[in-house]
Amino acid sequence: MFQIASKNTCKWPVNVQVPQDGGKRAKQTFTAEFMLLPPERQLALKNGAIPDEEFLCDVVVGWSGVNDADGVDLPFSDAARDQLVAIPYVRAALIEAYFDFVAGGRLKN
């Protein structure tokens, strides 16, 4: 049975490929809470009508598993979100995870 959800947010894994010395990458994962936006807003991002950062400020509404440089849990806030979104490889991972979320988990890395 399919039931239409009454909430418009969902917690979804984000896989970040963190650059390492020597041209390697290390996979690190956290969970983002995404807000489901209307299709026209999603299309605006795909078409380049809005900047990635602006889109992510609309859709990233929480997280877990994010630590600061000292390994201490970093609580979600607008300022912390903006700091995370400013990192290019994190921004790319968030966008990929969001569209995987809205595609029903059909996207593959």
Image (tube, grey):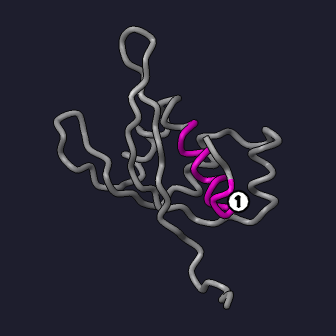
Q: What residue is rendered at 42% in x and 28% in y?
A: 18
Q: Quadrant of residue 26?
A: top left
- Name the dominant secondary structure of the magenta segment: helix
Which span of residues is magenta-colored?
A: 92-106
- Give x and y (percent) for residue 98: 60, 53
Q: Position of residue 57 (x, y in %)?
A: 55, 51
Front-most of residues 43 and 82: 43
Residue drawn where x is 28% and y is 55% of the image:
75
| Foreground pick, 29 / 1 | 1
Q: How many marks?
A: 1
Residue at x 51% of width, y 30% of height: 89
Magenta stretch: includes residue 104: yes
How far across and how far down the image is residue 49, in percent? 80, 42
Of all residues, the one furthest to the top in this rendering is 22
Task: Say if the magenta span includes residue 102.
Answer: yes
Q: Is residue 26 left or right of residue 43?
A: left
Pointer 1: what residue?
A: 103
At label 1, the amino acid type is Ala
Residue 28, picture quadrant: top left
Q: Which quadrant would the C terminus be assigned to in this image?
A: top right
Looking at the picture, how far across and down is residue 30, in whole percent?
Answer: 38, 49
Above-or-below relation of 5 to 80: below
Is 4 left, or right, of 57 in this rendering?
A: right
Which structural element holds mark 1? loop
Residue shown at 39% from the left, 57% from the top? 63
The quarter in which the N terminus is drawn is bottom right
Mark 1 residue crowding within 10 angstroms, few (<14) / some (14–19) / many (20+): few
Task: Check the image and report above or below for 10 versus 76.
Answer: below
Q: In the rendered view, does 90 fall on the left or right side of 64?
A: right
